[in-house]
Amino acid sequence: MRNVAKKGTGSRSRGARRSLNKRILRSTTLNILVLVVVCCGIMALALQSLARNILLDSLQPMARQSAKTVEANIHMLADRMMTIAGDSRMKGKTDKDARKNRKELLTEAAEIYELYAIAIYGLDGQLVQGIGALESLDSQFFALLQETDNLTTDSSTVYEGKLGVTMGMPVKEEGETVFYVVGVYKYDILNDVISSINLGKHGMAYMVGKDGIVTGHPDQSLALQGSTLSQLSGGNEEAISRVSTGETGAAEFSIDGEDMLIAFSPIRGTHWSLVIQNPKSDYDHFINGAMLVAVFSTLAVLVVSILLVLRLSRSISRPVKNVTSRMVALSDGDLHTEVTIAHSKDELEVLTRTLDDTVESVNCYISDIQTVLTQVAGGNLCVGPQVDYKGDFALIQASLNTILQSLNETILGFRAAATRLAGMSEELNGQSGQLHQASMDQNQSTEALVHEVTNVKERLSSVTKSSGQTRAKAEEIARCVHEANEQMTSLSGAMDDISANAQEITKIAQAIEGIAQQTSILALNAAVEAARVGSAGKGFAVVADEVKQLAARSESAAKSATEMVESTRAIIQNGVELTAHTAGSLQDISSVSDQIGTISDQLVEAVHGQESALCIMEERIEAISAIADRNLQNAVGTEQSSGLLAKEAESLQSQVRKFVLKEGHDR
């Protein structure tokens, strides 16, 4: 059902697609439109570039020719100035007639040559004689005039608030310059030339000096105000640089968003360059007209092309539509509908005939495959393909043969496997009984091992308890020994004090013995003196005799005390030595007690380690016991499964015997 639903969905999606005719027409029209747009764009860019190059190429010779025209007018003015400087009336320095002649010459030149001013200046640049002239020459112009010592044109055209062309010429006598004649021509002579240059609707020509200052312009106010090329060209550095260096050329730049074409050429014999500036928009209507003609022509060709493509697409789409419909029916499982042959004698006819042959071949192949599969489904594996498969369809024939051969080999393998499986099931049944008995023995051994481990744990607990008591007794002995050590230390100190007191007593006894000896001597002296006195000293003699006896007893007592002290000191010294030996013995006892405590700690730690090991062993034994229980259960299950396996082996053998195999395989 799912495959049928998918086929229905595929049929609806194929029916919803656009026709080939519309796709060809739309794709071709889109491609032609894109081509037209691209071509028009390229053509527009090409026309713009071509017009720009043509305009620049035409403006450049125009600028050069116009510069020559201005140059010719400048030469004409120069010739007039040279004529004035070479007139014979200019000769002489001090002669009054010569001065009068020069004035006449200057007046005549001013009237004839349209001069604002004409004058004669000395070698210091100061006015000598003139009409409407300044008192002194401009320092820059005068320096240039001295440097060239020939006809010189001032770079500036502003003269006393008016526009004019200033020229100077040295006047020589015998090869030496005696003074300079300087004239200022009216600007109208140059203005007529500049204004006569035909540059279109908004074009214009003007002159610029090397310093970038405008020297001549149709709008004379710009020249009077000292406007610069930078202002007129919108600050274009390329134009300023090329014009300032006296180069001849042309360029394009933008001023306030408007494209400008400019051409320039130097005016020889001056410091000026002629600049022609023209808006590019003056020529846009010519370019736009050419582009419109090209676009309309292209659109006309586009319409004709679309009609031709439509006719061609219909001749292609109809046979292709028939082929597509048959292919859709073929994909839905229709192998009986005939294919409509297109008699167009081209690839479409080959396509339709090929489709018809394909459908017929597929019908034949599918019928043969159906026959083979029906026989296989009935258990007959001796069949094979009866049709000769062509081309890549031969792979299907080879695959059918391979499948049949594999099925024969597989069934034979199943038969052998069923026989082996029956034998294995009998062996497995016997082995499962042995496994069941071994699992029961393993379970009993595990339980006995658990019992022994429990007894060992109880004995280790008793050892741990005894070790704890031993440790407590050892600590008590150590405490008693420590107290005895402290008491022996106190006793040793007391004996030292007694020894010190005995020494003091000995000293006192010795002192008493000395006093007794001196007293005896005094008693003897007193007796001698009493005998000398006679009867008067008898009483004193008796006293002296008593004193002598007392001294003798004191000396005897002192000696006895000294001997007793010495004896006591010997006894105390012996007691001190015994105390020291006793303290050493107590220290040895304390050390042994500490060793006993350490051994007890180690024994307790070892016992704890054994207990931990026994706990781990007990857990492992319990795990082994659990595994043994599972093995016992598995052995019972295996014994049951082996019986079922024997039954399945018998069933498999009965199923395999139903297949009829090819000769050579049915063994």
Image (tube, rainbow, N blue to C red):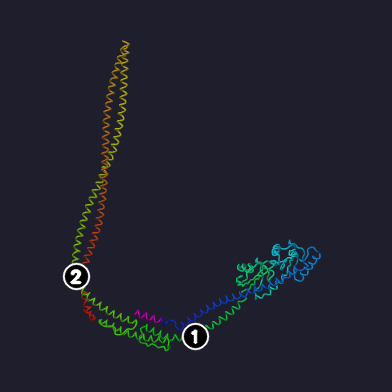
Q: Mark on residue 308?
A: 1
Q: Judge by depth and name the residue closer to the eye, 402 or 525.
A: 402
- Side of 196 where 10 appears, left or right: left
Q: To which residue does mark 2 refer?
A: 427
Please tell me in which quadrant of the rendered image residue 140 appears: bottom right
Residue 353 appears left or right of 129: left
Q: Nearer the viewer, residue 43 or 177?
A: 177
Farthest top residue in view: 535
- The residue at the point 39 percent across, 84 percent down is 327
**Magenta span: chief secondary structure:** helix
Closer to the camera: disc 1 or disc 2?
1
At 28% from the left edge and 83% from the top edge, which residue is drawn? 384
Give residue 636's position: percent from left, percent from top. Answer: 21, 67
Q: Which quadrant of the structure image shows residue 330? A: bottom left
Q: Earlier in the sequence, mark 1 or mark 2?
A: 1
Dot 1 surroundings within 10 Å: few (below 14), some, or many (20 or more)? few
Where is residue 458 shown, x and y percent of the image?
22, 53
Whether residue 166 sits left or right of residue 564 in the image: it is: right
Q: Element at badge 1?
A: helix
Crowd class of label 2 (few under 14; some 14 to 19; many from 20; radius 10 Å):
few
Q: Which residues are magenta?
A: 1-12
- What amino acid is at disc 1? Leu
Question: What amino acid does circle 2 point to?
Answer: Glu
382 within the magenta span: no
Residue 93 visible to an observer of this rendering:
yes
Q: CA distance from mark 1 to mark 2?
A: 88 Å
